[in-house]
Amino acid sequence: MRALVDANKVRRVLEALGRQSRGGGRVYLTGGATAVLHGWRGSTVDLDLKLDPEPEGAFAAIRDIKDQLDVNIELASPDAFIPALPGWRDRSIHIARYGDVDFYHYDPYAQALAKIERGHARDLDDARAMIDRGMIETSRLQEFFEQIDPDLVRYPRIDADAFRAKLAAFLESREDAK
């Protein structure tokens, strides 16, 4: 088991990945890395990344960085679990540029919907934190769900009615908190 990842280690990983990659591209952070860099969590177990477009040499760099910095790095993003939201790249939040690689927080709306669908307590806390920090608006979550609803059939693990109910319960809990 590798060490927990705090904000300093996330930044060190990004710098190393940008420095060791041999070409330009984009890397999107999701889940715990977003929570840690925005400060509502002190650490995370692993660093979830999406490479799009993949910087040349990124996989070799990731292999080496995992050992050099004692960090778990996974290739995971919301679009592996729910349909990609239209315009997700435009809503992704730029973090920094290291070397020829740009680093972003993956679209907060997609992150929140994927977390709501999964439904773990920590995931729901993360989705609430995104709202509390003004990263997402609850009214738009429902709109984005409606946009991806027809594509949920492509994700056999997801029960679309159950996902809809989880979202409704989450949104209702936010209304009750006001």
Image (cartoon, rainbow, N blue to C red):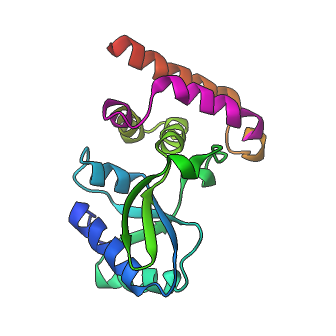
Q: Is residue 38 left or right of residue 163?
A: left
Location of residue 26 in the rendering, given as x and y in whole percent from the top left corner = 51, 68
Which of these two is toward me, 136 or 122?
136
For residue 146: magenta? yes
Location of residue 125 in the rendering, given as x and y in whole percent from the top left corner = 35, 35
Q: Which residues are magenta?
A: 129-151
Residue 157, quarter of picture: top right
Quadrant showing the N terminus: bottom left
Total numbered labels placed on residues in the image: 0
Quadrant showing the C terminus: top left
Determine if residue 24 is in view: yes
Location of residue 82 in the rendering, given as x and y in whole percent from the top left corner = 63, 45
Q: Is residue 161 left or right of residue 47?
A: right
Above or below for 55 versus 51: below
Which residue lies at the image location 47% right of the left edge and 25% below the top edge? 138
For residue 55: magenta? no
Which residue lies at the image location 30% right of the left edge and 85% below the top edge? 68
